[in-house]
Image (spheres, grey):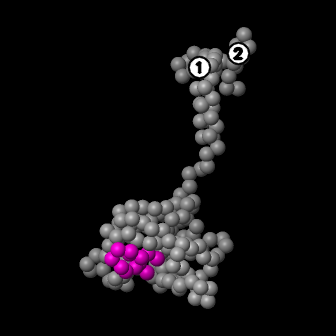
Amino acid sequence: MFGKKSSGGALLFPSLFGRAVIPGKRHAALFRHAVLAVTCASFAAPACADVKMCNSTESRVGVAVGYQDKDGWTTEGWWNIASQTCETLLKGNVPSRFIYVHAVDYDRGGEWVGKNYMCTHEKSFAIRGVQDCGDRGYKRTGFFEVDTGEAKDWTIRLTDPDDGAAKSDATQPTR
């Protein structure tokens, strides 16, 4: 038991200074807040990992992601990420070892593409399945693969193309 009864029947609570404190009006509010803080902390959810995207370019970018979870393939988009900022794309543990990314450079044109085709839409979307994109009213779009290993969280960083980078390099935008 956190408190114990005094000879007069009042509950005694240990103080920070080693003396017992009898909660009166002045201490009651502090005690309630302390109990509330401890209670809230004990019910807090465990920390979760996330999939994040950092835009290290000089442009604003739009990002779509694809992944396979227990229910099959999903693509989601668009996250609009300002230059030199990061955003959380997926909250919680990485859903699968491989994450797929497609990004568009809004300011200078070009896009980050790959050879893994999935469905996207012009506006915000969450699409189940990667087959028959056109027949379902979606666009068939190339995504590049990111191998996260067995990590529970992962950060993907988009960068501007180097002068010597190949235009087809999936980690760089094509222009």
Q: Is residue 61 above or below residue 28?
A: below
- Amino acid type of disc 2? Ala
Using the rendered image of the protein, determine whether residue 110 is visible from the camera's viewpoint: yes
Q: Is residue 111 located in the magenta-colored stretch of the structure?
A: yes
Return the residue found at the far front.
123
> Can you give x and y, in whole percent of width and height, for residue 166 in the image?
32, 83
Q: Is residue 158 located in the magenta-colored stretch of the structure?
A: no
Q: Label 1 to label 2, Cα distance in Å?
A: 15 Å
Can you identify the residue that label 1 sits on? 26
Q: Does label 1 or label 2 sit earlier along the sequence?
A: 2
Residue at image location 57% in from the left, 15% down from the top: 19
> Can you give x and y, in whole percent of width and height, for residue 13 in the image?
63, 21
In this picture, which residue range is highlighted in magenta?
Answer: 102-113
- Amino acid type of disc 1? Arg
- Per the image, label 1 sits on a secondary structure element best described as helix
Residue 10's disc number: 2
- Per the image, label 2 sits on a secondary structure element best described as loop
Q: Is residue 43 above or below residue 113?
A: above
Q: Of discs 1 and 2, which sits in the foreground?
A: 1
Residue at image location 54% in from the left, 72% down from the top: 124
Residue at image location 54% in from the left, 64% down from the top: 90
Residue at image location 39% in from the left, 65% down from the top: 82
CB contact under 8 Å: marks 1 and 2: no
Q: Is residue 100 above or below residue 10?
A: below
> Can you give x and y, in whole percent of width and height, for residue 2 in the image?
67, 26
| Left or right: 80 in relation to 90 | left
Q: Nearer the viewer, residue 94 or 129?
A: 129
